Image (cartoon, rainbow, N blue to C red):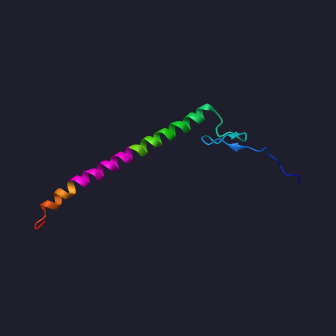
Amino acid sequence: MDKLSLPQHKHCLVCGKSIEMGKDFCSPECEKTVAARRKAQSRTTWIMMIVIGAVLVLFWIIMPALGALKPGG
């Protein structure tokens, strides 16, 4: 029995359609989708970093004040 041979290909990173080797996306729309996802992920990362930094600064400011309120402290 002969093997069925498919031409070398890969699949679009967004929708999974079969595309030729050397490409990552099947269309400009799929490429824009990935760019939008990366931008949103980057924005989320920055927001989380800012929030964590703000919480750390608040603890840095508040913790010494709480220590002064302890009896004998």
Q: Name the residue at the bottom extreme.
A: 72
Magenta residue check for 69: no
Residue at coordinates 14% horizontally, 60% vertically from top-left?
A: 68
Q: Is residue 15 left or right of residue 44?
A: right
- Front position in the image: 18 or 60: 60
On the rendered structure, is 57 left or right of 14? left
Q: Quadrant of residue 17?
A: top right
The answer to which of 50 and 3 lies nearer the viewer is: 50
The percent coordinates of residue 40 (x first, y second) are 46, 40
Q: What residue appears at the point 85 percent right and 52 percent down from the top-left corner?
A: 3
Most common secondary structure along the magenta stretch: helix
* In the image, farthest residue toward the top: 28
Q: Nearer the viewer, residue 41 or 14?
A: 41
Residue 1 horizontal/vertical position (percent): 89, 54
Q: Residue furthest right?
A: 1
Indicate the position of residue 20 as horizontal and vertical percent values: 73, 39
Q: Which quarter of the rendering shows the C terminus?
A: bottom left
Up-down relation of residue 66 to residue 45 (above or below): below
Residue visible at 29% across and 51% down in the picture = 55
Q: Nearer the viewer, residue 53 or 16?
A: 53
Q: Is residue 60 left or right of residue 24?
A: left
Per the rendered image, the range of residues in magenta is 47-61
